[in-house]
């Protein structure tokens, strides 16, 4: 994952589509980072997704989609 124009864009699973998350302006375009996706479930049924974006080992953005 890389920073482009002050945001990171990801393709989410489970029909949630694509999403772009804004990040702090101190990270210039081209900065490398890591995006982690956790699938939330209720009784084994997927109900949502939690996205965490980290740069240099520090989480800078977290957002949930659906029900978590």
Image (cartoon, rainbow, N blue to C red):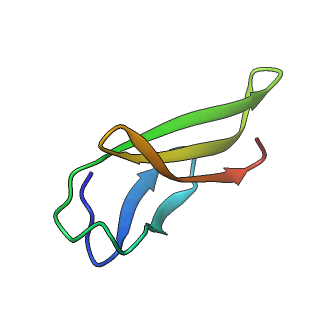
Which quadrant of the structure image shows residue 26? bottom left
43, above or below 54, in the image: above
In-image side of 37 versus 41 (left or right)? left
Question: How far across and how far down the image is residue 4, in percent?
Answer: 25, 71
What residue sits 41% from the left and 42% below the top? 58
Q: Is residue 67 left or right of residue 16?
A: right
- Pick the front one: 36 or 61: 61
- Using residue 56 as the reference point, say whether residue 65 is left or right of it: right
Quarter of the image that includes the C terminus = top right
Q: At 23% across and 70% down in the image, what residue appears? A: 28
Q: Residue at x 61, y 34 (%)?
A: 39
Considering depth in this image, is 59 or 4 the residue closer to the camera? 59
Farthest right residue in view: 43
Residue pictured at 78% horizontal, 46% vertical:
67
Q: How many marks?
A: 0
Residue 17 at x, y = what percent? 51, 60
Q: Nearer the viewer, residue 24 or 53?
A: 24
> Considering only vertical position in the picture, is 8 above or below 64?
below
- The percent coordinates of residue 52 (x first, y second) are 51, 45
Direction left: furthest residue? 30
- Using the rendered view, name the quadrant where residue 23 is placed: bottom left
Residue 62, how many percent across, how many down?
Answer: 57, 51
Of all residues, the one furthest to the bottom in this rendering is 5
Residue that extends furthest to the front in the rendered view of this protein: 26
Q: Is residue 16 above or below residue 45?
A: below
């Amino acid at each position: 994952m890389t920073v482009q124009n002050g945001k990171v864009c990801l393709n989410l699973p489970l029909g949630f589509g694509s999403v772009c998350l804004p990040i702090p302006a101190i990270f210039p375009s081209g900065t490398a980072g890591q995006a982690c996706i956790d699938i939330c479930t209720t009784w084994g049924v997927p109900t949502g997704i939690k996205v965490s974006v980290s740069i240099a080992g520090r989480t800078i953005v977290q957002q949930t989609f659906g029900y978590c």
